Image (cartoon, helix red, strand yellow):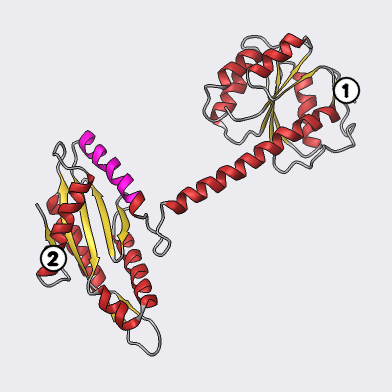
Amino acid sequence: MTLSTDRPPRGMISSTPETTPVHQRVLVVDDDREVREALVEVLTENGYDAMGAGSGEQALAILDGDDTIDLVLLDMNMPEPDGFDILRRLKTYQRSREVPVICLSARAAVEDKIAGLKLGAVDYLAKPFDVQELFARMARPLRVKRVLERLDRAKLAAEVLSLTDPLTGLPNRRDLERRLREELDRSDRASEPLGCLMIDVDRFKLINDQFGHAAGDAILAEVASALQASLRSFDLVARYGGDEFVALLPGASLEGARQVAEALCDVISTLTVSLTAQHDAIHVSISVGAVSHDPGSNDDAPMLLNRADVALLDAKRHGRNRAVTGH
């Protein structure tokens, strides 16, 4: 059948689209209410999640605020903004610039089709059109969009994995270095200090040698969990490497960083890790070097970490299981 301004009776479309839609949201943009409602009804009856917009401004508002639209069916002959203006403006909308648009128009001149395609439309269909042809033309851009979304999700997952320590689930050194640069910039802009703790598990090599690397891994995972649970939601704790962790404390002065470091020592000193029935539970402790970045100082990321590391070495030299502040 063809779709015109005559509203089709309910159930008149009995055949299904080329591919069965699964929660695919389609926005129908047409200032003719009867045509818009008829097309929404046909799409809904065939499994699409369809909604309508009666003007270009309404359509742009929906697309700017809703990132779940999978496809737009756009009437080109509307009062301003017309379909061509909408295509131009969609290019500036971050959320909708990748949403495929099929132009629907009674203007079938070649130059109109070329203009629409040059502005980013994926297809141009002249009115009146056969609904089954519309379904067939919708299928390809919807398939392409699903593939691209899967690729984006896979890329995002790979990016998250590249920034995560697989043993502890904490940010890894690469992510820490990025976040530390950001926090230093924020500290200077906001004129607020930034506390930094370098944390080391005491006598970790002896634990590995005596109980094996599996025991060492279990201890690192438990320490990581305890550190994260003991800090504020906006603090960051990352695995720096080996048995070392780094914590960033936005807004913490040197005295504040010292207090947090001592509290972490107390928390970890109560931690015991049970291994197997053949071994007693292992008691764990940490040493911490605490420093703070003052807004406007010459600290960069390596300098701040180095100062924290020097303080950590002092803590170890003075008997371990303690926090020492650095300069």
Viewed as shown, does residue 11 lie left or right of 26?
right
Q: Residue furthest bottom?
A: 278
Query: Residue at the spot x=18%, y=48% of the render?
Result: 304
Give percent across and percent down for residue 247: 26, 55
* Crowding near the residue tagged with mark 1, few <14, some 14–19, many ≥20 C-alpha atoms within 10 Å: few
Q: Quadrant of residue 219?
A: bottom left
Mark 2 — residue?
Answer: 315
Mark 1 — residue?
Answer: 2
* Picture disc at residue 190: none
Give percent across and percent down for residue 310: 14, 58
The amino acid type of the residue labelled 2 equals Ala
The earlier-in-sequence mark between 2 and 1 is 1
Please check the rendered image and state whether residue 77 is part of the magenta-colored stretch, yes or no: no
Image: 219 above or below 98? below
Q: Magenta region: which residues?
A: 175-190
Q: Secondary structure at mark 2?
A: helix
* Crowding near the residue tagged with mark 2, few <14, some 14–19, many ≥20 C-alpha atoms within 10 Å: many
Q: Nearer the viewer, residue 209 or 228?
A: 209
Query: Residue at the spot x=56%, y=48% of the render?
Result: 154
Give percent across and percent down for residue 278: 38, 90
Please check the rendered image and state whether residue 183 is part of the magenta-colored stretch, yes or no: yes
Q: Is residue 257 visible?
A: no
Image: 243 above or below 195? below
Q: Quadrant of residue 215?
A: bottom left
